[in-house]
Amino acid sequence: MGFPKWERKVRMFLCLFGLVLSVYALHVEVSRERNPDYRALCDLGESVSCSRVFTSRWGRGFGLVQYFVAKDSPLNQPNSVLGIIFYTLQMGLGLSVSKKAAAFLVFSSWVSVAGSLYLASILAFVLGDFCMVCVSTYIVNFALLYTNLKRRRAVQEIKEKAR
């Protein structure tokens, strides 16, 4: 058994979709910071506003980094920048067939899913908002975890057969 035939195409689609969502989120955040009257396409109403979510304290460093460094520190990046880095790494490492790359893909996916669950709870219970872009990235992260678990299993089977 080799890699699932669907894996590379699905990974590419998920990573590109995640990148588009992250770049759009960064665009909305920067535009809103420059112009407080900016209205994003994903701002559909009072309780359906992605720009409100992106510019909240939880939109940078998961709302946690600011407790360790200054709020305007270069280490306190927008979550969308972290997403851009994550999806780029997922795409690049997805080209490797090494066991270490597969393990890192799974580990980083678990971290992204944990972050998604954390941010989803903030979205629902603290902000009381619905953010279509956010929820879409959560779905992408769960789908990437599934894809990476399948990949890791395939890599393990390939390595075992090579022995």
Image (cartoon, rainbow, N blue to C red):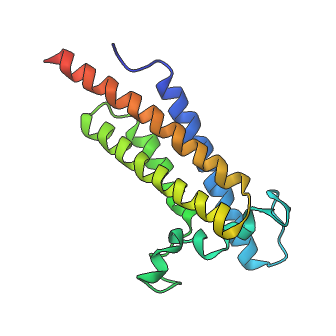
Near-viewer residue (34 or 148): 148
Please provide percent x and percent y for residue 151: 38, 29
Answer left or right for 44 relative to 11.
Answer: right
- Which residue is painted at 40% across and 28% down in the image? 150
Q: Residue furthest front?
A: 125
Q: Residue furthest left?
A: 163
* Quadrant (top left, top right, bottom left, bottom right) of the N terminus: top left
Near-viewer residue (92 or 114): 114
Near-viewer residue (88 or 4): 4
- Which residue is painted at 34% across and 34% down in the image? 96
Observer able to see residue 74: no
In this picture, is 139 found above or below 82? above
> Residue 4 appears in which quarter of the rendering?
top left
Q: Residue furthest top?
A: 1
> Residue 16 appears in which quarter of the rendering?
top right
- Which residue is painted at 60% across and 65% down in the image? 122
In this picture, is 67 found above or below 119? below
Please provide percent x and percent y for residue 124: 67, 61
In this picture, is 15 found above or below 123? above
* Quadrant (top left, top right, bottom left, bottom right) of the C terminus: top left
Please provide percent x and percent y for residue 24: 68, 57
Please provide percent x and percent y for residue 94: 41, 36
Answer left or right for 16 relative to 29.
Answer: left
Near-viewer residue (8 or 103): 103
> Residue 37 appears in which quarter of the rendering?
bottom right
- Which residue is painted at 58% across and 71% down in the image? 58
In this picture, is 100 found above or below 65? above
Observer able to see residue 56: yes
